Image (cartoon, grey):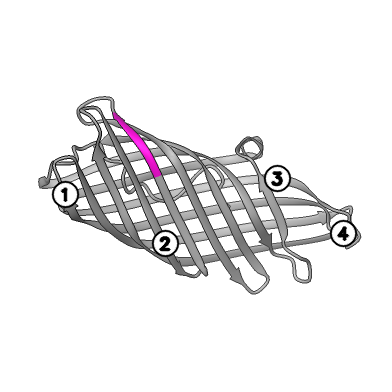
Amino acid sequence: MPAIACIVALAFTAGRADAQDGGDWKMRFNPYLWGSGLSGSVATVPGVPPADIDKSFSEILDNLDLGAMAGLTARKDNFGLFGDVMYVKIGAEQALGPVLGRASLDAKNFAFTLGGDYVIARSQRGELRVAGGLRYWNVETDLRFSGGTVGERSGSASNDWVDGLAGVNWLADTSEKTFVTGWAMVGAGGSDFTTDVFAGLGYRISERNAIVGGYRYLSVDREDGDFQYDVEQQGLMLGLSLPF
């Protein structure tokens, strides 16, 4: 499951909001971290209710085995392309009460997003882009119950799906060095519904490089037979925007 990472880096650009990217494509590498908590329901075991998970970022960090995430953007004139890759592996335990006892969860998540955007409004200080794309998810879960009245139960599942995404992203200068940026995306497809919203503040540490920090909320609701992945994540996010 996604724990400290996520999917899109649509607005991590250090260019001036009033500048049009003429000529060649401008490419940027966008590594980032997301200090996210996780809450929701996960199920893989037939005949057993979903396990409700509610973990803070610090608790997830204690159980993180591996996490890697980065994005790429390319822009020319009013057109833009974006991609993002994320892989997270965690293990966690949580007490669920006398019936289910204690749940142990090992989870691996791979997510890949690819899409494009286009400027629909621009001023001297800012721009608004309409965006759309596809997000591929692959989630592997190993769920075990012990110590409850249901007895020892365990199950494993691997599930993958694709969601379509649509929304907007924006950038507006607040001074020579600072800018506000963000996105709002909704989608569906393999999941019943997914939401992805970010709002942040950027600082140009040089003419071409920037650092961006803000707050992000992500939700996804996927049900496929006995498999259920209905989770919400939210927390602070920090990233860099580096040209190459």
Q: Which residues are magenta?
A: 199-203
Q: CA distance from mark 2 to mark 1?
A: 23 Å
Front: mark 2 or 1: 1
Front: mark 2 or 3: 2
Instruction: Point out the residue furthest to the left here.
Output: 23
Front: mark 3 or 1: 1
Quickly name the residue at label 4. Answer: 99
Badge 2 density bin: few <14, some 14–19, many ≥20, Cα 10 Å: some
What is the chief secondary structure element of the magenta stretch? Answer: strand
Q: Are marks 2 and 3 in contact (CB under 8 Å)?
A: no
What amino acid is at disc 3? Ala
Q: Are marks 3 and 4 in contact (CB under 8 Å)?
A: no
Quickly name the residue at label 3. Answer: 92
Label 3 secondary element? strand
Quickly name the residue at label 2. Answer: 186
| Quarter of the image that includes the C terminus | top left
Residue 231 picture quarter: bottom right
Badge 3 density bin: few <14, some 14–19, many ≥20, Cα 10 Å: some
In this orientation, which residue lies closer to the viewer: 18 or 162? 18
- Res. 122 mark: 1
What amino acid is at disc 2? Val
